[in-house]
Amino acid sequence: MVEDDHGHAKLIEKNIRRANINNEIKHFDEGGAALDYLFSEEILANGPLLILLDLNLPDMSGTDILEKVKSNDRLKRAPVVVLTTTDDKVEIQRCYDLGCNVYITKPVDYESFAGAIRQLGLFLSVIQAPEI
């Protein structure tokens, strides 16, 4: 999870847990640290299960992170959920064009968030990405 607002991060994690998703969550409050982690040998070898991404970060744009992730042969299959306050239609379309799987505008209510996470989980359970 890449989210600079710690209150939002706690709310997001709470909603993830309420949806019965118990995977480990690594939280980063800036893009540079998140990119260092995502491009580490361990993650490039095993891949993240899911990336939750805010667009408005103190050190860079989340769209820059999205573009780098989706441009990498090892990371491009990782599903990305954008969680942000930006509801501009052009920005939303840009995120989908770059490869995000779900775009959710904050503030997030539980039902909307849990529904999006459930839909993504269902999608992942029926679609098998090709091996590299």
Image (tube, rainbow, N blue to C red):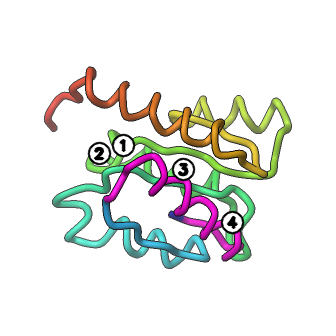
Return the residue at label 1: 76
Q: Residue at (16%, 60%) from the top-left corner?
A: 45
Q: Which residues are magenta?
A: 2-22
Q: Is residue 39 above or below residue 16?
A: below
Find disc 2 in the rendering and name its residue: 73
Q: CA distance from mark 2 to mark 1?
A: 6 Å
In this view, the mark in front (2 or 1):
1
Q: Residues within 10 Å of mark 3 (few under 14, many from 20)?
A: many
The residue at 36%/27% (across/down) is: 122
Q: Quadrant of residue 105?
A: top right
Of the residues shown, which amino acid type is indicated by label 1?
A: Lys
Verify CB contact (< 8 Å) between mark 2 and mark 1.
yes
Identify the mark nearer the N-term, 2 or 4.
Answer: 4
Up-down relation of residue 27 to residue 104 (above or below)? below
Q: Which comes before the other along the chain, label 1 or label 4?
A: 4
Q: Secondary structure at mark 4?
A: helix
Main secondary structure of the magenta stretch: helix
Tag 2's secondary structure?
loop
The quarter of the picture where the C terminus appears is: top left
Residue under numbered circle 3: 66
Mark closer to the observer (3, 2)? 3
Q: Earlier in the sequence, mark 3 or mark 4?
A: 4
